[in-house]
Amino acid sequence: MFEVFILTGSIGKWLQLLRANFLVLTVVTVFAGLAASFYQNHTINFLNATLCLIGALLAHMAVNVFNNYFDYKLEVDKYTPKTPFSGGINLIVNNQIKPSTAFQVGVLCLIGAGLVGVYFLKLFFWPLFPIIVYGAISIYFYTAYLSRIPALSEIIAGTNYGFIMLGASLTQYGNIGLVDFAVFILVSMLVGLLLFLNEFPDVEADKMAGRKHLIILLGRKKASKLYVALLISIYSLVVFLVGLKILPLTCLLVLVTGWLGYKASHIVLKNYDNVKEIVPALAFNVLIVLTCIGLVGVGLVLGSFLGD
């Protein structure tokens, strides 16, 4: 049975628990999915778009809450260095929110996302069913179990957002095209890159918790070089997809973030083993990921209007 809880006190702690400042990633991801559908169908279902965004936000909130809850249970929060972009929060550790209450909030968010999922399953069952099942399993089991499987953390995080994008497009008219798969790959790589760099400060604490992400497996020095290689591959993939005419020419807008990529890469290669000095790179990386996904969406919308 659920305990009865009341959202009293500072609303700030509840926004922190939900990690509200990170929800913009879901917004731009859904936008990219809707833009992909618009580019192919030249129209949009606003009801489905709104419900999809609500469901995706609830799912993201559930992920954030469960991450905090299981980090507390595994005692990771006690040892993780805190930065504005990594390390979690200490609301549960500091007894500002009861662990049971946090868990209940996570479950309620997951139920809310599930209800939205049921609505869409009635419309497009078979294409959506595996996406929703994959997301639900990932949300609940990621922190406690899946993050302990070697090199799986970044793949799960990236593909979950890729599937949010794919689901956003699919819930418009039930069809998926080559453009959708192209954007799926880009979003998955970008979000995987976001988690990848955010793991740099957490290596020691994550090792204690039994996690086996790529930074732990490779070491920070090799991982810093892989970060640069992945970033270059993302920009190269955009050019390649435009060259194949899978994406419109306007998606090359993504390349304007290249200067941010250069700055982030320079900092990471120089300060990969210094938690304090690498923080600016984390900030640049967040901007790169959010802006790139957003600009892919903008490029698709412009391409639809321009007939590109």
Image (cartoon, rainbow, N blue to C red):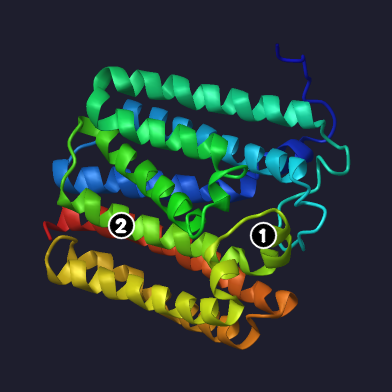
Q: Residues within 10 Å of mark 2 (few under 14, many from 20)?
A: some
Asked if residue 196 is positioned above or below residue 5 in the image, the reply reads below
Callouts 1 and 2 close, C-beta under 8 Å: no
Q: In this view, does 23 lie to the left or right of 172?
A: right
Report x, y in % for residue 157: 48, 51
Q: In this view, does 68 lie to the left or right of 25?
A: right
Image quarter where the C terminus lies is bottom left
The residue pinned by badge 2 equals 185
Front one among 260 and 208: 208
Q: Which residue is painted at 11% across and 56% down in the image?
A: 307
Residue 232, quarter of the rendered image? bottom left
Disc on res. 52: none
The residue pinned by badge 1 equals 86
Asked if residue 152 is positioned above or below residue 6 in the image, the reply reads below
Report x, y in % for residue 260: 49, 77
Q: Which residue is painted at 53% across and 46% down in the image?
A: 146
Q: Residue furthest top?
A: 1
Query: CA–CA distance between discs 1 and 2?
Result: 24 Å
- Three-letter amino acid code of the residue under disc 2: Ile
Residue 280, quarter of the rendered image? bottom right
Q: Which residue is painted at 49% across and 39% down in the image?
A: 138
Q: What secondary structure is found at the residue carrying circle 1?
A: loop
Residue 74, quarter of the rendered image? top right
Report x, y in % for residue 160: 42, 45
Asked if residue 237 is positioned above or below residue 190 in the image, the reply reads below
Asked if residue 74 is positioned above or below residue 241 in the image, the reply reads above
